[in-house]
Image (cartoon, rainbow, N blue to C red):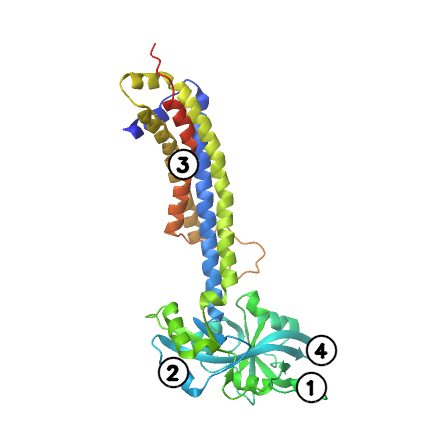
Amino acid sequence: MYFTFAWRYFKAKKSANAINIIAWVTVGVIAFATACQLLVLSVFNGFEDLVKSLYSSFYADIRVVPARGKTFFLTAAQIDAIKKLPGIAATSLSAEDKALLQHDSQQSITYLKGVDENYTAVTGLASYIHQGSFNTGTADEPGLVIGAGIQNAAAIAVGYGMQPSVVSLTVPRRGKVSVNDPLQSLGEGVAQATGVFAIQQDFDNKYSITNIDFVKQQMGFAADEYSAVEIKLSKDITPDAAKSSLQQLLGSTCKVESKYEQNMTLYNTMRMEKWVIYAVLTLILVVAAFNMISALTMLVLEKQKDINVLQSMGAHQSAILKIFLSEGLLLGIIGTALGIIMALITCFLQVQFKLLKLQGGTFIIDYFPVKLVATDFVLVSATAILIAFLASWFPAKKAAAQPFELR
């Protein structure tokens, strides 16, 4: 019943045309703000999925690292026990540290990561090779797969009919060091560039991948000493369950990290940026709320006689209050519905035709990615309707408190 009154008041012709104009402006602002919020959240969702997919190509589902220091020891029995745990699809051992990469007169600092033959089974790095191939060689003849940023910094040739470059790698060694001969603390070897990967600048400018036996030999690792164990999970187990099993097996000397925990700073930053933008765009709805207060206040003045008639027919203050609250909610609902429709149409066009392009051409895609999430629609709709309700409270309260005068 209350919405029936509200609908009649909304579509009825007013004595002052400004009331209609302000009402429609309010609806338009709510629709615009709602559409903007949904579009921005959808773009953030799209970028978040894209970044996660890129990072997922480099990071494994689970990583086991030392709780303290840079290395830890795993016996053959412990490694075999890890492989036999439920939900473990593949495991890969690695050894890594900073290294100085030299090619001719060019130098570059890189994170040299030695991996075993199972590395391609736990990560998707091999699918991002755009020059050469993923070949880490052997301990005696190591191959080096480098990031595109490292390739550019050190002018390394790979493929395109050119002789692959041979680079020198200088790494810190473990164990006792003689004060009389500081060079004993460094290991130096050579490797042939076999491939170049391009995933994301954080990786492309930082990592070089080679054979684990070569790295352990140059760094002076013991036979059972490693920097990390990277693990791929099967679909029938959750990361939390796998973490719990691994932590129980390996004890407190190791730290078990999920894919989220390996990139916690990145994911938290992306999530914070998303909600900060959402909060800023909510201010547009607050502006619409002031328009709504003006429209409803003028409507209350317009409908004074109707209010008196309703009061004479026995309508209580609560009924008058609900009528004008319903009027405000009606404006919010119409504006929200129009905003959702606008956002859906825009997202559909973007997905189908890639209308909005990214500038610069340096990213992996050249258009804004979008992903629609149902919870975003619920949140934005609830926010818009809540603000509409709060904005309509003061005019509705004023209408309900109006003294009964029938002339």
> How far from the left and from the top, in percent, is residue 253?
48, 78
Q: Nearer the viewer, mark 2 or mark 3?
A: 2
Q: Which residue is mark 3?
A: 335
Q: Which mark is residue 81?
A: 2
Tell me where residue 351 appears, x and y as whole percent: 43, 53
> In front: 108, or 255?
255
Mark 2 element type: helix
Left or right, 188 with respect to 95, comes to: right
Q: Is residue 102 left or right of residue 361?
A: right
Cα–Cα gap, marks 1 and 3: 72 Å
Q: Earlier in the sequence, mark 4 or mark 3?
A: 4
Indicate which disc, 1 or 3, sits on the residue closer to the N terminus: 1
> Counting residues from the N terminus, which is met first, the one under dot 2 or under dot 1?
2
Mark 4 or 2, nearer chain start: 2
Considering every residue shown, the one lying at the far bottom of the view is 140
Quadrant of the image containing the N terminus: top left
In the rendered structure, which amino acid carries the disc numbered 2?
Ala
Q: Nearer the viewer, residue 34 or 103?
A: 34
Considering every residue shown, the one lying at the far top of the view is 407
User: Could you tell me how far apart the alpha carbons at marks 1 and 4 are, in whole angstroms?
Assistant: 21 Å
> What residue is rendered at 43% in x and 49% in y?
347
Percent x, y of residue 41? 46, 50
Residue corresponding to mark 4 = 105
